[in-house]
Amino acid sequence: MKNPQVRMLTEGGIMIALSVILSHITLYQMPQGGSVSLGGMLPLLLFALRWGTGPGILVGAIYGLLDFIIKPYFFSVPQVLLDYPISYGLLGLAGFGAALYAKYQNLSFVLGFSFLGIFGRFMGAVASGYVFFAEYAPEGMNPLWYTITYNASYILPDAILAAFLLVLIFKPVMRTLPQPQA
């Protein structure tokens, strides 16, 4: 495909579809929302690493909207925006490593920037939890600490699984990228 914009749109659609499929393979479901899936974040992270932050945020946000449509959890409009398009859009922060990903082809860069994107998603979930769901904190527990531990209990295992899968597929994925210019 010679047109990079068409290629980017095509890859974005494929990565969104893969994320939807993988996110439905649930390994662990939290009682008040959130789950560990079989690498549901990985395609979105790979897209951001390949195409950069802006496109990564957009594709993540589109995935977030689709996730809400497929399995909605509605409390208020601001909560929906924060939990879905904003939180998943922040996975696109992994795109800050796009240039390093292509140039150095180094797994440590990829993992580091992937965790930056995952941390963005975590912060979106924590913000939503603190603002909209603090009432679920056990009596006497700090609501911020509660939302941090609650969201970490499923996002951290999801991040570890995504990193493991990324290590497994890193070399085949790198072979599909254009080689860096010297």
Image (spheres, rainbow, N blue to C red):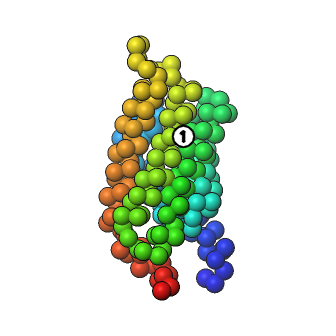
At mark 1, the secondary structure is helix
- Residue drawn at x 47%, y 69% as measured from the top left: 100
Give the residue at x 46% y 47%. 119
Looking at the rendered structure, the kind of residue marked 1 is: Gly
Q: Which residue is mark 1?
A: 124
Q: Residue at x 57, y 64 (%)?
A: 52
Q: Quadrant of the N terminus?
A: bottom right
Residue 5 in the image, given as x and y percentages of width and height = 66, 73
Q: Nearer the viewer, residue 108 or 61?
A: 108
| Residue 178 position within the rendered picture, expressed as x and y whole percent measured from the top left | 50, 81
Looking at the image, which residue is at 60% across and 38% down? 82
Residue 2 location in percent, x, y? Answer: 63, 84
- Res 35 quadrant in image: top left
Specify the farthest residue to the front: 182
Residue 162 lies left or right of residue 84; in this view the side is left
Q: Is the residue 85 above or below the residue 8 in the image?
A: above
Residue farthest top in this picture: 139
Does residue 171 sit above or below 46 in this rendering? below
Residue 94 seen in render: yes
User: Label 1 neighbourhood size at 10 Å, few (<14), some (14-19), many (20+)?
Assistant: many
Residue situated in front as seen by the camera: 95 or 125: 95
Outermost bottom residue: 182
Q: Is residue 63 visible?
A: no
Relative to 92, is 86 above or below?
Answer: above
x, y percent for residue 143: 46, 22
All told, the count of numbered labels is 1
